[in-house]
Image (cartoon, rainbow, N blue to C red):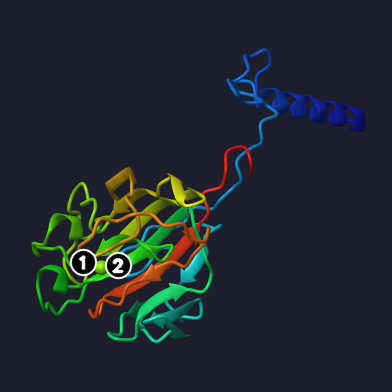
Amino acid sequence: MGALTAALMLAVAAWVGWAQLGEEGTPMLPGLPYRVHDAKRPHPRVVIPGTESSQERPGRPPSDAIVLFDGKDLSKWVNRRRGQVSEAKWKVENGYMEVVAGTGDLLTKEKFGTGQYHIEWASPTVITGNSQGRGNSGVLIMERYEIQVLDCYKNPTYADGHAGAIYGQWPPLVNACREPGQWQTYDIIFEAPVFDGDKVVKPVYFTVLHNGVVIHNHQASMGPMVFRQVASYKPHEPLASLMLQDHNNPVRFRNIWYRPLGEYDKP
Ligand code: MG
């Protein structure tokens, strides 16, 4: 095959490839600078998907995740107790961290807002207490908006305090809890609130999967977690820490990561 023939074949292949990437003469999409099937529309960024966790081992996070805890150390975290910040003191062993009662809540050094949060947790195998006293902790996004962590396997408690509840507001749609000691997953898609001066103009929205089961579907939150009160919004900083609650029970966590949601047509 001559060089000219090869070059011609390459050119044809390139043209066919380009032609297959999109259509011409299609209508404009309403409100968008793109046509239907537009070849010039930016392609989505490539992310290498993670792997699922098993009881024996945590899965691998997606390639663009910010890994906050990989089972080795608490270098990305600090403790906070009664407003005092100190080096992280929760126990780390066998690939998980465990609440050490009285050391305070655990907060990421890095601050986040809207995004996808993945957290795995396990209730203590030695069952003590009942209702809210049994395997209590919490995932507080932006240090405020809580998805409750509780041993809810055959442990009756008030509905809006269940595992997976938007605490004090919305029970989970279903109780998808595993037995104490079993690893459980939370996949939380969180939308941060938007404030205009003192007023909230867009509330927090939660979409949450517990062990792969939808327990909140784009549910608005009434405001930050409060106890025995009705929540209400107060303006706060646009980014804040992810916080895990010290509620005096030795709850375990592993495989914690965050990824920003990104925006359409902005790869
Ligand atoms: Mg809690």
* Residue count near mark 2 (Cα–Cα under 10 Å), binned few <14, some 14–19, many ≥20: many
Q: Foreground: 13 or 153?
A: 153
Judge left or right: residue 56 versus residue 234.
left
Name the residue at 15% across, 69% down: 132
Q: Which mark is residue 138?
A: 2
Mark 2 sits near ligand 1, with its Cβ under 8 Å away = yes
| Amino acid type indicated by mark 2 | Gly
Displayed-image quarter of ligand 1: bottom left
Label 1 and label 2: CA atoms lie apart by 8 Å
User: Relative to residue 15, is residue 263 depicted above or below?
Assistant: below
Count of numbered badges drawn on the protein: 2
Residue that numbered label 1 is attached to: 150
Residue lying at 59% horizontally and 47% vertically, measured from the top left: 46
Asked whether residue 58 is in view, the answer is yes
Task: Tell me residue 139's x, y (percent).
Answer: 34, 65
Which amino acid, mark 1? Leu
Nearest the eye: 102 or 175: 102
Q: Position of residue 253 (x, y in %)?
A: 34, 72
Q: Quadrant of residue 158?
A: bottom left
**161 relative to 89 in the view: left or right:** left
Question: What residue is shown at x 52% (from left), y 66% (from top)?
Answer: 111
- In this rendering, position of residue 113 left or right of residue 89: right
Query: 164 or 69: nearer the eye?
Result: 164
